[in-house]
Image: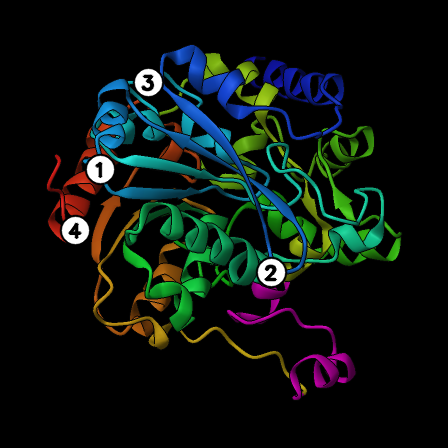
């Protein structure tokens, strides 16, 4: 009965929160009310998207920065259907964005194109097909690249990077590009993904088998927004007697051990954010083909786009051996599967530091009530051992 109530609440909240993602203020909504100084920035990618960045400090670290002695910059990169608010959804003692600020880091919060906290495009309207003509490939090569370049230009410092889920896909792809990775001090990846062919999430596998991604594109739906009426209805329609979605979250992410179920209604006020149908199609290509490659347009258009019949792969061996990496993965994670994670490790040029949490599911890495001691404290120790912390 509790699970049926959860799915009813989920759908009603999604349908009740259909909204225009007009780029409000994350600082004003979630961060400043918790007592943390926060400022908003807008940056422009090479292909014209206007991304929102937030810069978060504690009061003490802000005073140090104003005297030229602030902590090192860290960029937070969110997962699919999420945005920068993902790092601030629990209390200040439990949320990574606040915890990093309390430790003196100069926290920069990334928001990729299409999300609520970004600000559209210099010429394209959101209702146009062309606005949504991108996948995680562009997020890696344009969005992450511009965020890192901008933060580097403002702080004159190399940057620590933290990614979760899609944030790790785009981080690893970006790190294969010498002009991007040269500005990165070290990276911590939560639920790291580069390969997806062993995904075990029942609802995701059902969507892949039904070719939902291709059907959506064929229907001319280019914005994937689960806060729209059709988006919420799609999730419900995929659940029937053969696939129980009483616990819808677990059917997508795996069983999560440690987040506060009493806060689900609050989480759903913020999430999910829109993404593009092409992005979902790219991710489903990875599941079907077992590849970590650029978007597959089909042989003819691949030849036009890439000069070859098959899309080029992102070669993890191009990530510099000298880049310190820290990765945390979970035994109940149905998206970042252990087998796929081991595949990623084999392709990296040097072994990262690894944390394994047997009972963690995909969402626990950002919402677990125990994440501070399980994950964030070890991550911060890793960063402090990897960089220069003269002011900390």
Marks 1 and 4 sit apart, C-alpha to C-alpha, by: 11 Å
| Residue corresponding to mark 2 | 138
Instruction: Nearest to the eye among marks 1 and 4: give it.
Output: 1
Q: Is residue 83 magenta?
A: no
Neighbourhood count class around disc 2 (C-alpha, 10 Å): few under 14, some 14–19, many 20 upward: many
Sequence order check: which comes first, mark 2 or mark 3?
Answer: 3
Q: Indicate whether 317 appears above or below 12.
A: below
| Residue corresponding to mark 4 | 387
Marks 1 and 2 sit apart, C-alpha to C-alpha, by: 30 Å
Neighbourhood count class around disc 4 (C-alpha, 10 Å): few under 14, some 14–19, many 20 upward: some
Q: Is residue 295 magenta?
A: yes
Marks 1 and 3 sit apart, C-alpha to C-alpha, by: 19 Å
Neighbourhood count class around disc 3 (C-alpha, 10 Å): few under 14, some 14–19, many 20 upward: some
Which residues are the magenta region?
285-308
Q: Which of the pair 119/342 is nearer the observer?
A: 119
Q: Residue at x 70, y 49 (%)?
A: 276
Marks 3 and 4 sit apart, C-alpha to C-alpha, by: 25 Å
Q: Residue at x 24, y 64 (%)?
A: 323
| Residue corresponding to mark 1 | 71
Q: Indicate whether 146 appears above or below 2.
A: below
Q: Residue at x 63, y 59 (%)?
A: 284
Marks 2 and 3 sit apart, C-alpha to C-alpha, by: 32 Å
Sequence order check: which comes first, mark 4 or mark 2?
Answer: 2
**Image colouring:** rainbow
């Amino acid at each position: 009965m509790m699970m049926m109530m959860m799915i009813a609440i989920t759908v009603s909240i999604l349908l009740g929160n259909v909204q225009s993602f007009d780029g409000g203020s994350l600082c004003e909504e979630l961060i400043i009310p918790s007592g943390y100084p926060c400022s908003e920035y807008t940056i422009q990618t090479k292909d014209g998207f206007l991304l929102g960045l937030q810069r978060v400090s504690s009061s003490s670290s802000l005073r140090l920065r104003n005297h030229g002695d602030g902590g090192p910059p860290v960029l937070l990169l969110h997962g699919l259907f999420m945005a920068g608010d993902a790092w601030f959804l629990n209390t200040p003692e439990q949320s990574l964005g606040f915890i990093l600020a309390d430790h003196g880091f100069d926290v920069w919060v990334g928001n990729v194109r299409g999300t609520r906290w970004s600000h559209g495009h210099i010429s394209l309207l959101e209702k146009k097909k062309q606005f949504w003509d991108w996948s995680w490939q562009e997020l890696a090569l344009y969005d992450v690249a511009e965020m890192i370049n901008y933060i580097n230009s403002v702080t004159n410092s190399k940057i620590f990077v933290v990614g979760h889920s899609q944030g790790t896909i785009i981080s690893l792809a970006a790190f294969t590009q010498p002009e991007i990775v040269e500005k990165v001090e070290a990276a911590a990846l939560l639920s790291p993904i580069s390969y997806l062919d062993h995904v075990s999430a029942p609802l995701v596998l059902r969507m892949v088998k039904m070719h939902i991604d291709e059907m959506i594109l064929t229907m001319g739906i280019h914005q994937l927004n689960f806060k729209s009426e059709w988006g919420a209805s799609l999730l419900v329609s995929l659940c029937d007697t053969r696939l129980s979605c009483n616990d819808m979250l677990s059917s997508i992410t795996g069983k999560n051990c440690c987040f506060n179920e009493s806060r689900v209604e609050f989480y759903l006020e913020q999430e999910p954010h829109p993404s593009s149908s092409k992005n979902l199609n790219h991710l489903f290509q990875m599941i079907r083909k077992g590849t970590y490659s650029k978007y597959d347009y089909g042989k003819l258009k691949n030849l036009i786009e890439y000069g070859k019949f098959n899309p080029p792969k992102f070669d993890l061996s191009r990530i510099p051996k000298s880049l310190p990496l820290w990765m945390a993965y979970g035994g109940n994670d149905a998206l970042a599967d252990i087998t796929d994670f081991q595949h990623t490790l084999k392709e990296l040029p040097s072994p990262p530091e690894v944390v394994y949490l047997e009972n963690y599911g995909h969402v626990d890495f950002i919402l677990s009530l125990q994440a501070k001691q399980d994950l964030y404290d070890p991550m911060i120790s890793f960063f402090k051992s990897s960089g220069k912390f003269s002011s900390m």
